[in-house]
């Protein structure tokens, strides 16, 4: 986030990924009033899960969450969100929808260098979550 802040301090307008996603959803017909942008600068999936958990804890209605991510990242994202929502004692169903706009092929991931790198990277990140971050997720505010 430091690079964004440095550019903004110099007067540059930075369109963040979340703003791009919101604008695309609106352009595709989703009413702007149906989109909630959560505040903060999440730097990781864990940060995102904590922000969503805090938001859901203050909202009486939502009981379903649909995660949309790259197919390679979907398993870890699900693990993180389930852990954080359980910690917050939120009975929220977490559905997964891997993006169809990814070139990742989960059935033949070992055939492309990029897919192999994605799988190995995700396994390392899963281990990191299980060994280090999971404890933080369980005690975070």
Image: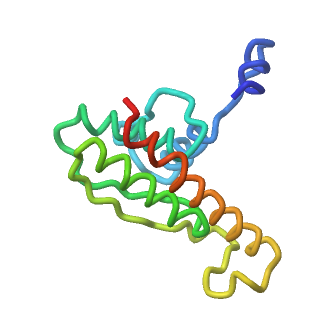
- Indicate whether 136 appears above or below 129: above
Q: Quadrant of the N terminus?
A: top right
- Residue positioned most to the front: 131
Residue 45, position as x, y percentages in the image: 53, 47
- Indicate whether 122 appears above or below 26: below
In this image, 137 relative to 91: left or right? right
- Which residue is painted at 42% across and 35% down in the image? 51
Which colouring convention does the figure follow? rainbow
- Which residue is painted at 69% across and 81% down in the image? 109
Residue 115, position as x, y percentages in the image: 73, 74
Q: Nearer the viewer, residue 114 or 100?
A: 114
- Indicate whether 134 appears above or below 35: below
Q: Quadrant of the C terminus?
A: top left
In this image, 120 relative to 130: left or right? right
Q: Nearer the viewer, residue 57 or 134?
A: 134
- Which residue is painted at 58% across and 69% down in the image? 71
Residue 30, position as x, y percentages in the image: 41, 49
- Which quadrant of the structure image shows residue 96? bottom left
- Which residue is painted at 55% across and 42% down in the image? 23
Q: Nearer the viewer, residue 65 or 19?
A: 65
- Indicate whether 67 appears above or below 62: below
Residue 48, position as x, y percentages in the image: 48, 41
């Amino acid at each position: 986030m430091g690079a964004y802040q440095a550019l903004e301090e110099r007067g540059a307008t930075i369109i963040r990924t979340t703003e791009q996603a919101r604008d695309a959803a609106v352009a595709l017909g989703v009413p702007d009033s149906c989109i909630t942008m959560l505040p903060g600068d999440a730097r990781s999936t864990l940060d995102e899960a904590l922000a969503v958990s805090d938001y859901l804890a203050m909202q009486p209605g939502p009981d379903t969450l649909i995660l949309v991510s790259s197919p390679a990242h979907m398993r870890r994202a699900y693990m993180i969100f389930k852990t954080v929502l359980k910690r917050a004692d939120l009975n929220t169903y977490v559905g997964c929808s891997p993006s169809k706009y990814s070139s990742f092929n989960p059935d033949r991931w070992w055939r492309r260098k990029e897919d192999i790198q994605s799988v190995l990277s995700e396994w390392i990140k899963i281990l990191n979550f299980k060994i280090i971050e999971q404890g933080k997720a369980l005690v975070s505010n």
